[in-house]
Image: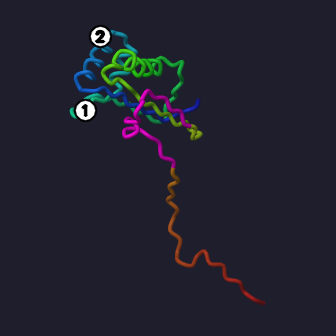
Amino acid sequence: MGYRSDVAYVIKFNDIETRDNFVTLMLAKNEPPITQAINECEYGYTDDPIITFEATDVKWYNSFEDVISHNTLMREAVEIYKHKGGRYRFISIGEDGAEECDEDDDDGDLWDYISTVHEIRTSFPDVPLGASTVTLTQE
């Protein structure tokens, strides 16, 4: 079955034109795994120059071709467009609760888009009032 994770990342640029140029450049590579990675992302935001990706319950191994492609997107956004604000933040939470974070975000701006919250939620069934009260009888 394998270890499964929930993963998400955001890539941000200074402006929408730069973001769209980056997407065009990645698609122009004409490399099917990179094209698939771009197509799995959301980049149609009209007021925010970001690219986002989120997946739940996935096998996210660095040796897998799709993971390599997503990592390439994050790395190349910084390498090619650092001077135009290219930066990213990646978070993974494994099925055991272990977190992994990787980022190139000097000012912490991307924390507004992606962070983790650990909490306990319950949905215990209703118990009739007094049902948990122990009554001791004396003999």
The kind of secondary structure element at disc 2 is: helix
Density class for disc 1 (Cα within 10 Å; few <14, some 14-19, many ≥20) is: few
Residue at left offset 39%, top offset 20%:
78
Q: Where does the C terminus fall, quadrant-wise? A: bottom right
Residue sitting at the far right:
139
Q: Which quadrant of the view contains residue 36?
A: top left
**Which residue in the protein does label 1 denote?**
45
Image height check: is 113 above or below 138? above
| Depth check, front residue: 38 or 81 | 81
Numbered tag placed on residue 28 in the rendering? 2
Closer to the camera in the image, 128 or 57? 57
Q: What residue sits 43% from the left and 17% below the top?
A: 72
Q: Decide whether residue 104 is among the magenta residues.
A: yes
Q: Which residues are magenta?
A: 99-118
Observer-nearest of 58 and 16: 16
> Cα distance, mark 2 to mark 1?
21 Å
